[in-house]
Amino acid sequence: MNTTHVSHTPWTFGIPSLDDDRRKLRTSLNEHLDCEHEKKPRRNSFLGSFLRELLLYFEHEEHIMLEFGYPAAEEHRDHHRRFYARLAKLSETDLAATDLAQKCLVAFDKELVPPDVKFKQFWDERKKPRSLN
């Protein structure tokens, strides 16, 4: 199977702990894109493991958003819930592990990055020095 791998230098927040979480998720996807044996137990193991990692990432990101007063935190959390539910439904399919990983990869980059860009803009803005006026 010809697979596309996720860069190990992905888009980052500039928040070391969140950036580490994102790298771990991407590493997990890459490991499963490389699996040659597409047995169902490995497939189920992959999806369960990835969803657990994803939930931890979401919880961590949402905690930081709330801690720093991100005004769109609730909307962002709702987006996480919808995204998670869509990925969890993949467990009802007969896709092989590599196909599941590929679908997760595409969803991760196309659906999670755009809302995170808004949070990054907020984060970058709050890091700017305030004027002394």
Image (cartoon, grey):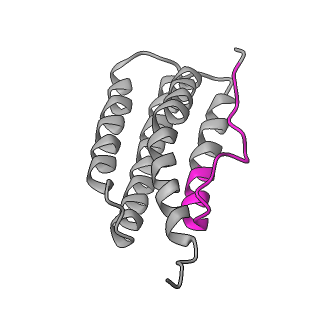
Residues 78 and 84: in front is 78
Q: Quadrant of the N terminus?
A: top right
Query: Is 7 left, or right, of 65 in this rendering?
Result: right
The residue depicted at 38 percent of the width and 31 percent of the height is: 87
Could you tell me residue 127's position as x and y percent? 55, 71
Q: Which residues are magenta?
A: 3-24
Which residue extends farthest bottom? 132
The residue depicted at 51 percent of the width and 35 percent of the height is: 108
Q: Name the quadrant containing residue 16.
A: bottom right
The residue depicted at 58 percent of the width and 65 percent of the height is: 15
- Residue 29's place in the image compared with 35, above or below, is below
Could you tell me residue 90's position as x and y percent? 38, 25
Residues 31 and 131: in front is 131
Q: Name the quadrant containing residue 60.
A: bottom left
20 in the magenta segment: yes
The residue depicted at 60 percent of the width and 58 percent of the height is: 19
Query: Is 19 left, or right, of 5 in this rendering?
Result: left
Could you tell me residue 27's position as x and y percent? 65, 45
Residues 116 and 106: in front is 116
Could you tell me residue 67's position as x and y percent? 36, 72
